[in-house]
Image (cartoon, helix red, strand yellow):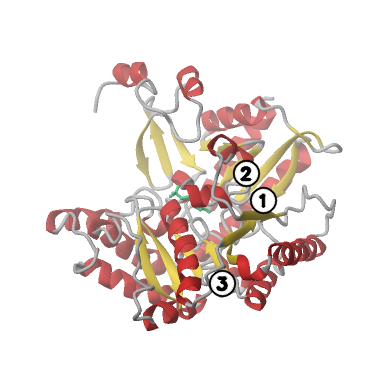
Amino acid sequence: MKDENYLKAHNARSMWHPMTAPSDSLKNPPAIITGGKGVRITDIDGHEVVDGVGGLWNVNLGYSCQPVKDAITAQMERLPYYSTFRGTSNDCVIELAEELRKFFAPDGLVRAFFTSGGSDSVETALRLSRQYHKIRGDQGRVKFLSLKKGYHGTHMGGASVNGNANFRTMYEPLLPGCHHIPAPYTYRNPFNESDPAKLAQLCLQALEDEIAFQGASTIAAFIMEPILGAGGVIPPHESFMPGVEAICRKNGILLIADEVITAFGRTGAWTGSRLWGVKPDFACTAKAITNGYFPFGAAMISERVAEVFEADETGKAAIGHGYTYSGHPVGAAAALACLAETQKLDVKVNAAARGTELYQGLLALQAKHALIGDVRGGHGLMCALELVADRASKKPADKAIPGKVQAVAYQSGAMVRVSGNNIIMSPPLVLTSADVQVILSSLEAGFAAL
Ligand code: PMP
């Protein structure tokens, strides 16, 4: 490693950071993280904090998960790469596909298509959805519906179904035929409805209306996150996703669950689809599939969709899609070890228990600080605080405020993440109650300092 002076002098000079204005990272150079142990990370100044962000919603098992590290090292030595394109496979990926099939069986998902990350998994599900309809002779089903506030990665397809202007505007024109309906976001919605159950019904009606407007026979799929993540942790009412599923079925529209954040225990259930009791046609996964240690993902595919592809011998089901790193043996080895460890530790149980503590603590914080307009969470370890200038108008807090809270929280012992006027928490699922308290007391310090 280069010395501290070199690293600080060159920080952000020769690279652009994702989701950051280059001028910003030059003015406020990013923290240089040099170590990770358990649920804690250390920066170049030796400052150690609880990682309330869990990497980027992905380091579910923390930074010291030896079985995953060992699996990566051993596979690196044995076979560091081979492709899974037509004609070749590798032992790890065969075993992983079988293990994923068992893991996702309760969701009705029986096949895996491997990718290098979440955006790839989304793109895979979108493309295979169109192909599914074409194989069946339904040429006109090409459009996609999704939720405003949804986040589905950064490829052109994913960006087109994204529901946040800041990930879209500068990259337009995006894919034609992508349409959005209001998210069941209780704190702010176009219906001014504050009852989550009623709001879910209004959003479902909006979905029905949009389908009628577009024509059901033009729509390939509806994509949603079981709990919206990057949009500010928005858990829908329990009736919403089952309602979406029923509407999709009725209209011959495929349902894609974007489980890039929610799969593998984060919500307190093994998958977000299982949390709501729905069976999607695709589930997009990535992130925690390798505990963040190796770029990897999988689009999981339902039996219904698999049957159509597997029965076709006309050539229409030939998959003209795939990545050099689809089924990467090192990623597959990491994912196998990670899945075993995830299940052995039964991390969803701790996610639910610690998630409740964190959510309760955040509600207590809201009672003390008027800046906190809304607290969202209550389903495992994904929580957010939405900061407002005043609670009556719900006007978003001044742009600088969340960053100030975050900076003091960091100095006080916890990393949290700023996204717009939200402060987001998604810590490793293996954290303790004491770690939860560190996150809460650090945030408390952040708000007290304002
Ligand atoms: N979908 C969702 C729901 C996500 O949260 C993300 C990443 N935060 C993605 C897709 C994109 O994943 P990646 O950054 O690995 O491409």
For image coordinates 70% across by 71% down, the residue present is 243
| Residue at the disc numbered 1 | 148
Q: Do the numbered discs 1 and 2 sit on residues whose CB atoms are within 8 Å?
A: yes
Name which residue type carries label 2: Asn
* Label 3, label 1: how far apart the Cα atoms are: 23 Å
Tag 3 secondary structure? helix
Quarter containing the N terminus: top left
Mark closer to the chain start, 3 or 1: 1
Tag 1 secondary structure? loop
Q: Spot the residue most to the left.
A: 78
Q: Is residue 43 above or below residue 81?
A: above
Mark closer to the chain start, 3 or 2: 2
Q: Is residue 281 above or below residue 347?
A: below
Q: Which mark is residue 164?
A: 2
Quarter containing the C terminus: top right
Q: Nearer the viewer, mark 3 or mark 2?
A: 2
Relative to the observer, which residue lies in front, 230 or 46? 230
Query: Looking at the picture, how far across and down is residue 317, in whole percent?
Result: 38, 73
Relative to the observer, which residue lies in front, 393 or 327? 327
Relative to the observer, which residue lies in front, 418 or 212? 212
Q: Nearer the viewer, mark 3 or mark 1?
A: 1
* Label 1, label 2: how far apart the Cα atoms are: 7 Å
Label 3 CA crowd tier, 10 Å (few <14, some 14–19, many 20+): some
Label 2 CA crowd tier, 10 Å (few <14, some 14–19, many 20+): some
Name which residue type carries label 1: Lys
| Residue at the disc numbered 3 | 274
The answer to whether residue 264 of the structure is visible from this angle is no
Q: Which mark is residue 211?
A: none
